[in-house]
Image (cartoon, coloured by chain):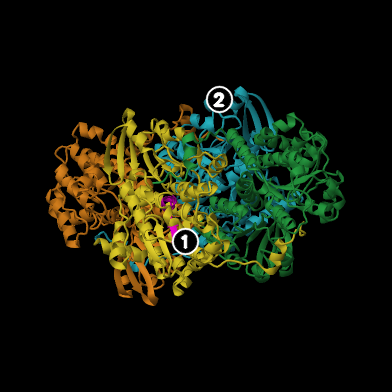
Chain colours: A cyan, B orange, C yellow, D green
Amino acid sequence: MEEVEKGDLRIGWARDHMPVLLEATRGMVEEKSLEKWRIGMAMHVEAKTAVLALRLREAGAQVALTSCNPLTTDDTVVAALRERHGLESLARRGQSRKEYYESLQGVLEARPNIIVDDGGDLTYLLHTERRELLDEVRGGSEETTTGVMRLRVMEREGALRFPVIDVNDARMKYLFDNRYGTGQSALDGIMTATNLLLAGKHFTVAGYGWCGRGIALRARGMGAHVKVTEVDPVRAVEARLDGFEVMPMKEAARTSDFVVTATGVKDVLRKEHLKVLKDGCVLANAGHFDVEISRKDLEALSSSRRRVREHVEEYLLEGGRRVYLLGEGRLINLVAGQGHPVEIMDTSFALQGLSVLHLTKHHSKMKSQVYAVPGEVDEEVARIRLQTLGVKIDSMTEDQRAYISSWKAGT
Amino acid sequence: MEEVEKGDLRIGWARDHMPVLLEATRGMVEEKSLEKWRIGMAMHVEAKTAVLALRLREAGAQVALTSCNPLTTDDTVVAALRERHGLESLARRGQSRKEYYESLQGVLEARPNIIVDDGGDLTYLLHTERRELLDEVRGGSEETTTGVMRLRVMEREGALRFPVIDVNDARMKYLFDNRYGTGQSALDGIMTATNLLLAGKHFTVAGYGWCGRGIALRARGMGAHVKVTEVDPVRAVEARLDGFEVMPMKEAARTSDFVVTATGVKDVLRKEHLKVLKDGCVLANAGHFDVEISRKDLEALSSSRRRVREHVEEYLLEGGRRVYLLGEGRLINLVAGQGHPVEIMDTSFALQGLSVLHLTKHHSKMKSQVYAVPGEVDEEVARIRLQTLGVKIDSMTEDQRAYISSWKAGT
Amino acid sequence: MEEVEKGDLRIGWARDHMPVLLEATRGMVEEKSLEKWRIGMAMHVEAKTAVLALRLREAGAQVALTSCNPLTTDDTVVAALRERHGLESLARRGQSRKEYYESLQGVLEARPNIIVDDGGDLTYLLHTERRELLDEVRGGSEETTTGVMRLRVMEREGALRFPVIDVNDARMKYLFDNRYGTGQSALDGIMTATNLLLAGKHFTVAGYGWCGRGIALRARGMGAHVKVTEVDPVRAVEARLDGFEVMPMKEAARTSDFVVTATGVKDVLRKEHLKVLKDGCVLANAGHFDVEISRKDLEALSSSRRRVREHVEEYLLEGGRRVYLLGEGRLINLVAGQGHPVEIMDTSFALQGLSVLHLTKHHSKMKSQVYAVPGEVDEEVARIRLQTLGVKIDSMTEDQRAYISSWKAGT
Amino acid sequence: MEEVEKGDLRIGWARDHMPVLLEATRGMVEEKSLEKWRIGMAMHVEAKTAVLALRLREAGAQVALTSCNPLTTDDTVVAALRERHGLESLARRGQSRKEYYESLQGVLEARPNIIVDDGGDLTYLLHTERRELLDEVRGGSEETTTGVMRLRVMEREGALRFPVIDVNDARMKYLFDNRYGTGQSALDGIMTATNLLLAGKHFTVAGYGWCGRGIALRARGMGAHVKVTEVDPVRAVEARLDGFEVMPMKEAARTSDFVVTATGVKDVLRKEHLKVLKDGCVLANAGHFDVEISRKDLEALSSSRRRVREHVEEYLLEGGRRVYLLGEGRLINLVAGQGHPVEIMDTSFALQGLSVLHLTKHHSKMKSQVYAVPGEVDEEVARIRLQTLGVKIDSMTEDQRAYISSWKAGT
């Protein structure tokens, strides 16, 4: 199948499976609510993102789009966006760091007044090299934990220059996207990249945040014996009582067949761990940046390195130990897979759409800080999701409402 | 075995398995930190609670204790407390409502200046009939969701008259006590009460809060086919993606072999549901009060009622349907079981002990509102728990801390 | 509640939940098919067994009943059988070995011509001390793996003197009774006996036969971290790929919080393992005989022993390690619990009922060997079970039958 | 990456992860045990199969290889086998039926005296069109359930003309390959083909044999709500007690988001089911032949059909319902994925290697019937697998052996 056709089918397939986004933004599209707004997006450019971008355009916006990661672009989607939908994007799979930042610059050239960011690189650029553009920016939204962490630091330091809606911490986002989206797609990516068995394998997940627990859960669901490493003691107790083994990475590394990082922190796997890694261990990263597994240390410690399969590089370590790094340590679910399942992004992007709308309406009263997604938006998206699932739920009676509103009803 | 002996063994067994409480309160005991403090406790009087009460006494406090529920007292523990430990308690299993409130009054007679409450009845009594005692109360702590809900209403209405620490919402509490404590003990209670099989059964959990999800998880762990009812759309989506079926109670009732309530709300099972309940359905409650399954409606709709087993009453409904109510609709895990596993209460009560200490130290600077357990207390308890489990975890390097403290490190 | 009343309610409750047995034996009862037959039963005398015994009597048989284990009798059921149903039994909870064998002798005094055995003690007695009674025995049925193992040896050695139907290896038996019956009831017994938490605990199951895998599955279902020990390499691989850790007992003992045996073999936990057992470890047995955990070795190695709870004895081992033996090492699910769930025994006893009928009809053509339950009986019981569950299934079309009956239909 | 290189890397990767096959056949290779033997193989031609074929050649055999399915060949592997290993194969992905049979004929041209078959097409051809070659065939081995079903019919009808070893029913085969191999690879294939979410989806598995239960287990492990259809009542009860819903396909079809067939029977999804299929339902097959989902009926009932994604065809049915057929109804794990995980085939092919050796040694004493893999071969492979996993297990003591060899040790 030809590239453009392939990409367009993927976009069509995604759109067909994104009823929540379509329904949540129906009003916006009917009313062209985003007319005159210029939206700059830096997100993984693949089918689901294309649907969001096109939908924002349907609502009247001008959209400039590039990727938020050098290795996660689906080139067929870029081609289809250009050829079939007239939406140009500089994104390309396998960009150099330089090309990557040039693409971000390209988006900024469109002088966006709304930013839709994923990981914070676009926001960073605006606040450093391209401060002259800040004045036109009315607000932004951020998709992922890592980006929110950066924004929180900016906020604390007083560096942030426009209001940002933290889509990541909406309940309809992190409960599903971070956990079940990452869980399924990371496992899918690992299976596709390796064709190795998971059942009975020792599988270590670094980090027991929402992403980490999704991966841990799904790895167990495939029959693996899962271990967790953590730095937070409460999360460590939780992982243990969730039925996982908890131990320091140095100990986990000795016995693991797979190690997957999802911490948002750098050098989670570094020299001291690489030195004791079990022969044959497969390493993958599901965190936003490619810093969690230290490639510098891998290279320093290895006597040779060769590609042994698509998406798999073998490093030969001391003692003849072979270690396999998947997808250069970049987001495994997008590098070796197709990213989160469509329905997951459907929900997340419904939140994005409504957050953009919220910014266009309320930016003048908003400060340069990080805002939560309004509770009613969260609930609204949940209600549409239930509808699309054909699920009905109970509602409280008057009597019940009265009951929980009183402190006098006891034994 | 004789009552006193049985109760004392239970207390001893519990104490032997509560190293976190002992360690967390070691300093308090060594320094007699609670000397001159009078603590009034209303908690399920069973072995683990006895360990907490005795420990507070070891730290110097005068302790007055009674139950927070008419049907959850372990009489052997009451006997052992009296005979072996000189701690008198009016609690008794199977109290009438009148006797129950007399016992609470008994605790108040001791003129407590710290309140340790579970469900809020003691706090309620202080704020209504016994307001003359309020002046001496320096603060309180609350153990359970229902009590916190009542306190939040009091706070909103400006009715609350002393600071209360919300132990329930500490991470080391709700993640484990509400979820895994309730999960295991509710299932244990149901199995003990019925000797029925769970595998393959249709098992409905009303409410997908922390308690509800613990029950749902454990019921699935025993092989049941689990359904969830909810009123919150986000939780409903979560339950569905967690792999449970979600539907209104009216639909669930038609096909369920078991229905267990854990909502904190009254009349979750009422006429409209009872009318369609499947023949043979077993009803149990895991919420704090016995209001979730309407016994009034059950009685109104049934032509006869008889005890068919210890803890099981059969109601004969229209159409010859037999429905089995466990433990009179009171907390099934305490009525038919032994309450939460010891190690769970170990953690929860370590939080209680430290919260009481915190109140004695800081009450003068605290307002009449609901306070969270300080984050460092939560972490401290987690660290002790990890220690007792023999689990070591990683800690962040300087480099890593720097990394997450900067917004400038990106792609 | 009075003993007799309590026992009778239990029998009634069980009967109400045993529709498969009632339906499968309906014809037998209507036709009094067992008239003139004397049945000698040695089974755990508790509510479900009472239902079977009474049902066989309804079908016309004379029934003599005692227990197959000194510590598993429900005395309330014995009382109710005697007082309410006129069925005398010598069974009593807590018999000495001598009393136990006297009770078996009591059953033989009734000169049974059909034997319903569980574990093989009755059969053993007949083939050793009471050979003079063999002539009248037309056949037997055996309920459990251990009994079948003994019968197979007898068959191999030519010692067996009447035909025996191996109920244990019917699919409708071992898939459910051994696996899910044992799984649920053993866990229930352990929770009742200890009130300890399972989530996050290291839980070792010795033996990965049908019972062992049931226990392993349910322990995992309660959140435990489960290890398996095995002697069969294929089963060991299976346990590993089922997601459990597999290791020798000597290694498992060092780190386990619980060890449960289900092997059918003696001395599974013996000196070498007891010497390294982790402090605080709980030991329980789910195998038929109390030989799996060597009490002799426990006593030899311990400096003291005391009862610390009902069903729990503490042994003090070298190094101050405390080890807790549940229920004297006898079947934990019956000693500390109520045995298998009712519905499980419903199915197993339907097979027993039909097997007895089969023996009465076909014994003259049967040899002194071990017979499988006829496939059609297995299927018949399955069909009734589906009916009681309200489950419908597909059936093959003519076309489909033709398809699988031909070797010529290929690619 | 170039085709040949890609294929060769895949073979190398597979070989590196197949230590059991290498170890089990080490002696054969050292002794060139297969010298002078001509082996005709019809198996899915992909990396793992290539390793087996090359290994048999290393042991001295002449090997002729083609595929057992028109749509499962990995063309890169065919290229690598030809260019790098000098092993010619006519297999090609996407063969017509005619080409497919020509390739089988090609293998027969090599006049094999040992047949390694998968599904039985090669065996069929030998017993029909190419009977003249039968005289040279000393024996065969069969890999899969479907092939064994055909062989059993041939055996019953007296049509079989050489001894065949039924590798499929070795414990080390079906417990792992059929269950966990199919489970993981089918799910992987479905995720790759659709990028759809599994969590919370209604997922129906037709057939609860070893393949079906693997799929059901893994679908549940990914968070799906799994239903099972069966024709065997015992299996139906088992599926239900394993926690799945059981119902006729006609009912399942109405509510399913995914239906996956694994029955070995034709027309499992036919007109009556297609008429009520839920809009948006995804259909896939994991059975050997593409007959389980009736494409004939799909075409008859649909008004249009179009490719909407690689491996996905959309059929438009009455009422505007869209139904998605994956991989033309052929083995989804090979069509859209990479087949079973390497380690799974490692074990299965170790059994194949040893079965071929067994045939060469014992064929003269074997009859034209279906033989089980000898128990000691099964155990040997298990022991090597444990070794490669670094797992040690217990072994019985003399005392224990004596215990289970006696029928006299009882209570």
Residue A290 figure quarter = top right
In the image, residue C120 lies in the stretch drawn in magenta:
yes
Q: Is residue D121 above or below residue C363?
A: above
Percent x, y for residue D131?
85, 52
**In front here: C50 or B329?**
C50
Residue A160 in sight in this render: no
Residue at the farthest front position = C132
As measured in the structure, the alpha-carbon distance from the residue carrying label 1 to the one carrying label 2 is: 61 Å
Q: Is residue C154 above or below residue D285?
A: above
Q: Secondary structure at mark 2?
A: loop
Neighbour tally class for label 1: few under 14, some 14-19, many 20 plus, Cα within 10 Å: many
The residue marked by circle 1 belongs to what chain?
C
Q: Which mark is residue D239?
A: none
Give left or right: position of C114 versus D229.
left
Q: Which mark is residue A275?
A: 2
* Three-letter residue code for mark 2: Lys
Which residue corresponds to mark 1? C352
Q: Is residue D76 above or below residue B195?
A: above
In the image, residue B155 lies in the stretch drawn in magenta:
no
Percent x, y for residue C227?
47, 40
Query: From which residue to which does the magenta span run?
Result: C113-127
Residue C9 in sight in this render: yes
* Three-letter residue code for mark 1: Gln
Q: Which residue: 59% across, 36% down?
A: D383
Viewer-nearest of discs 1 and 2: 1
Q: Secondary structure at mark 1?
A: helix
Residue B385 figure quarter = top left
**In front here: A159 or A15?**
A15
The residue marked by circle 2 belongs to what chain?
A
Give left or right: position of C377 versus C29.
right
Percent x, y for residue C235?
55, 43
| Quarter the C terminus of chain A occupies | bottom left
